[in-house]
Amino acid sequence: MRLHTAPDHGVVGAVATAISQAGGIVTAMDVAESSHERLVVDVTCSASDADHAKLLEQAVDALDGVTVHKTSDRTFLLHLGGKIEVSSKVPLRNRDDLSMAYTPGVGRVSTAIAEHPEDVWRLTSKGNTVAVVTDGSAVLGLGNIGPGAALPVMEGKAALFKRFAGIDAWPICLDTQDIDEIVRAVEMIAPGFGGINLEDIAAPRCFEIERRLRASLDIPVFHDDQHGTAIVVLAALTNALRVVHKSLASVRIVVSGGGAAGTAIVTLLLAAGVTDVVVVDRAGALSADDTSLTGAHRQLAEATNPRRVTGDLHTVLTGADVFIGVSAPRILKPEWIKDMADDAVVFALANPDPEVDPAEADKYAAVVASGRSDYPNQINNVLAFPGVFRGLLDARASEITVEMLLRAADAIAHVVDDDELNPSFIIPTVFHPDVPKAVAAAIRGA
């Protein structure tokens, strides 16, 4: 906070006291300007969250002789000017460098690619570049906030690609939510990229976009909200079942949410050998006997729920071994977990607020995971997509297969060895150096 105060240096102590009494921690305090008329004081302090920061500001502003001139938030400061940039890999020190990196020398390279198109992978950045494409319709848990508001998230995704896999990714935020326009836009920019990462596009539109792009492009198309989530969920579930000594083929699983993530999770679970999975949406369990279902829900119902159970979430959850939530906050009451099978596994993955408080779920379940970083067992897509694309680009793959997804999940799961495995550690940290290497190797092997 930058404060304008009365010309009394005793005010500095009063400010520190007010912040402390409001639960904040002062980490720095400097008098930036001093005159007979006023002091300008810069105060840096720690707050628990954005709401608490506002309370600290109000506490200081309430002091006699003190005005909060402006405040800044370190998260916003980090985003000033964006989080990514383009930098040159070659020196441009003199005319000679310029003549090779640009005209006239670059013309020879362009001619060579025109004569041998496959050389574009070797002589340009294409082989290490991914487009992160969104229409801004389903950004994080914020909903349809548009392409401009989605840009900070896509920049963050690009930064993760670079940090964890050395891949140059670039955000492409499209100002349209028309399927035909999105597909055509991606087709037109595809020559400059080695892969397409679809991101934060709402269901069911995302299914059609992915299907059409996979059919028309000769580079891999990966929808991270679907397949990245599915990979990490399967990896975590593999290890959770190792903890409770159950197998994928024998457990009963309930998935809350029939959107993009839920559909992809179910599809991968079935491919991994799960035989009994029931999807629950707002109206209850999806069943092939329900003639009112249409489109994607109809297909999902026909592939699941072999016992044709009906009812709400609590009803369907009774006797189940596993709950996987990719739906909405606070829809699972903690005490319902008691009605599940012994040694229940609960994955509450809605973000930022999960289906059930992980701390409350932990009282009843044997293993609990969430999408949050402040609890054990965080299910985070960054465990998957950097290594997946590293492997795809290295192998110069033209498509992504279910076999690749299964191998990637198995690779993540087995980064956690038997000595490390326990109910609070079923998935490696996103900073584990072996994860992207293991996933990339698994993709190349497929």
Image (tube, helix red, strand yellow):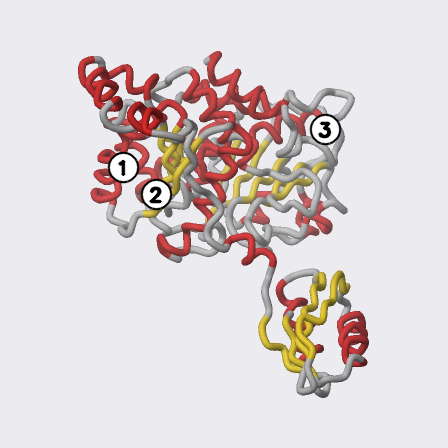
What amino acid does circle 2 point to?
Ile
Question: What secondary structure is marked by label 1?
Answer: helix
Give percent across and percent down for residue 234.
Answer: 56, 29
- Residue beneath label 3, please? 244
Asked if residue 207 lies left or right of residue 443, the reply is: left
Q: Is residue 290 above or below residue 112?
A: below
Distance (Cα) linking label 3 and label 1: 44 Å
Toward which corner of the image does residue 304 lie, by quadrant? top left
- Of residues 113 and 206, the one drawn nearer to the viewer in this rendering: 113
Select label 3 or label 2 by which is in front.
2
- Of residues 338 and 383, the one drawn nearer to the viewer in this rendering: 383
Q: What residue appears at the point 60 percent right and 51 percent down from the top-left corner?
A: 354
Select label 2 or label 1 by which is in front.
2
- Residue beneath label 2, please? 172
Distance (Cα) linking label 2 and label 1: 9 Å
Q: Earlier in the sequence, mark 3 or mark 2?
A: 2
- Of residues 32 and 313, the one drawn nearer to the viewer in this rendering: 32
What amino acid does circle 1 point to?
Val
Select label 3 or label 1 by which is in front.
1
